[in-house]
Amino acid sequence: MINAVGREIPEEILKITGKEPFKGNHYFDGYEYKKDGPSTRCVINSEGSKLVENIHEVLVKCGIQDGMTLGFHHHFRDGDYVVNMVMEEIHNMGIKDITICASSLGKAHDKLVEFIEDGTITNIQSSGVRGKIGRAISEGKLKGLAVMRSHGGRVRAIETGEVRIDIAFIGSPTCDDYGNCRGIGGKSDCGVLSYSMVDADYADKVVAITDCLVPFPNFPAHISMTKVDYVVVVDEIGNPDKIATGAAKPTTDMRKLMMADYCTQFVVNTPYFKDGFSYQTGVGGASIASTISLSKIMKERNIRMKFGVGGLTKPMCDLLENNQVDALLDTQDFDLNAVESVINPKHFRISAGEYADPFNKGAVVNKLDFVILAALEVDVNFNCNVVVGSDGIITGAQGGHPDTAAGAKCTIVIAPLLQGRIPAICTDVTTVTTPGESIDVVITDYGIAINPRRQDLIDAMKNVDLPFKTIEELRDIAFSIVGEPERVQFDDKVVGIIEGRDGTVMDVVRKIKKFEFSGE
Amino acid sequence: MINLVKKRLRRTMMFLNAQKPGLIKDPYIYRPDSIILDLEDAVAENQKDAARFSLYHALKEIDYRGCERVVRINGLDTPYWQEDIRCAVAGGCDAIRIPKVECPKDVHRVEEEILKAEKDFGMPEGMILIMAAIESARGVMKALDICEASDRLFGIALSGGDYTKDLQTRITGTGIELMGARQNLIIAARAAKVQCFDTVYTNLDDMEGFQRDVETIHLMGFDGKSIVNPRQIPIVHDIFTPSGKDIIFAEKVVREIEEKKEMGIGVFTVDGKMIDIAFYDGARRTIELAKASGVYKGDL
C-alpha cells in the first residue's frame, strides 16, 4: 500500500504491526482515546527504604522473565553504562526474547549486538540505533522488527498502551533510598530526566539506578518516589566525559559559517521574527553558529525570544544568561553548560510528552516559531531522511525531528549539498523520516530552497539578497558535481519500520544486500 | 593572441593541495578570486605524479564557476616542472605560477614550455598566463626585469617564507622583515604595469594580526594576497573592496573632473579635498574595482 509520502508499505507489515500507513501530519488531529495505565503495587509500610543490593536482585524482585519489555532513557548519551549493565545481567540469567524500548541507543551500546545475535534481545524500539546495533539490524540479525520512533511518538506509544513497559530502568545521577531521582547533584550529571518521565508514569515496575545515593528527601524530585519501586546503587552509571561534552565550540569551518549566515538572514526576514518569538536548534556547528549570529541581531533590533526549546547547548543557555530569552524549556542537555544551567529558575525541565507528544492535549512543539534541523538526505518533495545512511545502513536517530518539524511555523533544514561524494539533496530519500509537508526551507552551501507550499515565505523573501534556488536545481547541481548515484540495493526482507509520530508507518527499512554491478 | 583576462580581480589567491580531491572539488564555494592548485611544496616528493593525475582531472571535470585556476609548478631546479606544465596546459588551466623566480630567463624557459604544450595539445596559443613568485634577495633585486619578461606575465608575488630564510632572518609577524621586498616588488610591478600580490599569513589563530597585515599591504598598493584558509577570504575582500563612502567619493571625483574639464577648470575641491586631473585614474580604478567586486550600483 502506498502511503501519503509515496512509500510502499507491505500489507504484511501493516498486518503484523496492526498499524495504518502514514496519511498526513494532521490525520489524527481531534482523535480521542483512553490512556492505558500501569499496574501499581501499594507500599503502606514504614520499612523506609527501597534499596536493593544489586541489579540481579532487583531483576528477581521485578519478576524478570522471557518476553518482557524494558524501558531505558538515553540522557547519558555516549557515556551510558546502564543499558549494558542491565542487559549483561539479564543475559547471564539466561533470559531471552527481550524487547528494549529505549528513548535512543547509540555507540555506547555496541555491546548489545552480541545479545541480539544470541536471542537475548529480539525486538528494539528506539529513536535511533547508531553504531553497531544499526548495522546489526540492517544485516537482519534482529529476530523481530526494529521500530524507530520520534521522542513524541515514544510517549504516544506508551500512553496508548501500544507498548507496555514491564520494567523501566532510570539511570539517575542522584537518588535517595526512596526513589526520588534528580538529573543533577551527582558525579555523572545529565541535567534532566525528561525521556524517562513517561516510563515512570506507565511502566509496571520502575527501578532507579544511581551511583550517588543522597539523603532523603532528594527534592525537588525530577522523578517522584511515588512512581519508583526499587533503588539500586552501583559504582558508575556513566562516563561523565561522554555524557555532556565541554561547551561546543563555535565552528570555524567557513562552509558551515556560510550556511549559518544564510539561516540567520532567512530567519530575520520572516514575519515570525519579532519580539516574543520562540526557537529551537540542534547541536550541529552551523546551527550553533546561527544561534550566535541571531543573538547579535536580536540585540541590535531589541527583539527578545519568549522561549527556547531543546536539546540545549551553551549558545541557548547564554541567551538566558544575557537576558535575551524569557525561558528555556529543557528535554535534554547536550553540554556541560546546559547541565549547569538547569538550576536557573527560568530554565524549566519538561517531559518528552510535554515537549512533543502528538497524542496529548497540546505539546510545546505546537507553539514553536522556528526550528533549525539537520538531515542526512532531503528529496525534491522535501521529505527528510535522518535515520538510514545513503549506503542503506541504519545510522541515525529520529529524535525530535518529525515532532518539531510538524509543530514549528518555520522549519529549516541545514545540510551541505554533498556529504563527501554523496548528494544530500536527491530525487528520493533512501528512507523517509520526516514528511515533506513539515519542511519549509532547505539551506545548503549552494543555495536555499523554499517549499512551494509556503508561498507566504516565498513572498517574504522577494527582496532578500540570498541565493534562492528550487530544490530541483539544488539536486541537479549535486548530480552535476558527483553524478547521479545508483539506488542502494536492498533485500526484500523488512527489518524495521520508521514509525510516524502518530503511530502510522512512514516507511520501512529493508535488509541490506551486497551491491550487484549490472553485468555481473 | 592576447588573453583578455590578464588584468582581473585577484584580491585573494587561495592555495590548495592539488593532490587532495576533498579540497579541490569545490573551493569556489568560498568565493576566492583565484585558486592556486599546488604541485610544489604541498605535495610530497613521491606523490608528484599522483598530484598531476588529480590536477588534470580536476581541471577537466570541475566547473570552478568563474574562479581563476592557477597551477603552481615545481621549481626549475627540479625534474618535475616540464611535465607539470604539460599536465596543467592539457587540463586547460588559466595560469602557471613559477616558484623561486630570480631572473627573466626563468620566465622565458617556462613560457617556451607552455607554448610547446599549447601546440601539442591544440590549445589556443598565448592563452595561458604566467605569474612569478619571488622568494629570494636576488629575485627582489631583479623584480622589474622579471615583470617585463613576458606578455603572458600578469603579476608577481612575494613568497615570504623562503625569502626571509634567504635574508637570514624569519617571519616575525611584525612585517619588518618583509618591508624591503614588499616595497621593491610593488614599485617594480607598477613600473611594469602588472599586478602584485603579498605573501601568505599562516597563523590562523591570529585573525587580528592577519587583518592588520592585509590593511598594511592594501595601503602599500598591493592587488591582493595569497591565502591558505577560506576564513581569510572575507577579511581580505572586505579590506580590498571599496566602501560605500569610497565609491561615493570616487563618483563625485569622476563626475566633477569631467564637468570641470568642459568648463576649462583644472583644479577644484571635492568634499574639502583638492582635486585635479591626476585623481581621475584613481577614482576610475575605485569604481572599476567596485564593479568587479559586485558592490557598484551606480551608472558610471
Image (cartoon, coloured by chain):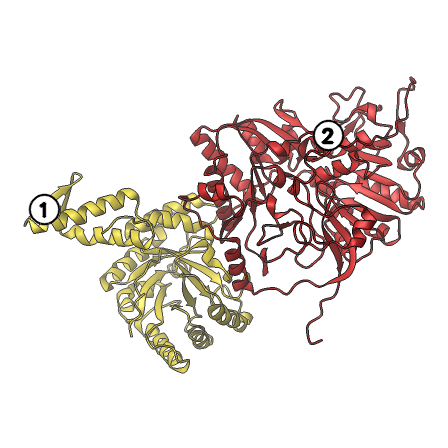
Chain colours: A red, B yellow
Q: Are marks 2 and 1 on the same chain?
A: no
* Residue B221 as seen in the image, left or right of residue A434: left
Question: How many residues crowd around disc 1 within 10 Å: few (fewer than 14), some, or many (20 or more)?
Answer: few
* Residue with the most extreme bottom position: B120
**The N terminus of chain B lies in which quarter of the figure?**
bottom left
Above or below — where is A343 with respect to B93? above
Q: Amino acid at mark 2?
A: Gly
Q: Amino acid at mark 1?
A: Val
Say which residue appears at 62% left-offset and 24% top-offset: A344
> Is residue B93 in view from this perspective?
yes
Question: How many residues crowd around disc 2 within 10 Å: few (fewer than 14), some, or many (20 or more)?
Answer: many
Q: What residue is shown with label 2?
A: A183
Above or below — where is B71 with respect to A169? below
Q: What residue is shown with label 1?
A: B267
Q: Nearer the viewer, residue B78 or A261?
A: A261
Pointers 2 and 1 in contact (CB under 8 A)?
no
Q: Position of residue B71 (x, y in %)?
A: 43, 67
Say which residue appears at 18% left-offset and 39% top-offset: B271
* Residue B3 as seen in the image, left or right of residue A319: left
Q: Position of residue B168 (x, y in %)?
A: 39, 58
Q: Nearer the viewer, residue A520 or B169?
A: A520
* Residue A495 as seen in the image, left or right of residue B59: right
Say which residue appears at 44% left-offset and 74% top-offset: B81
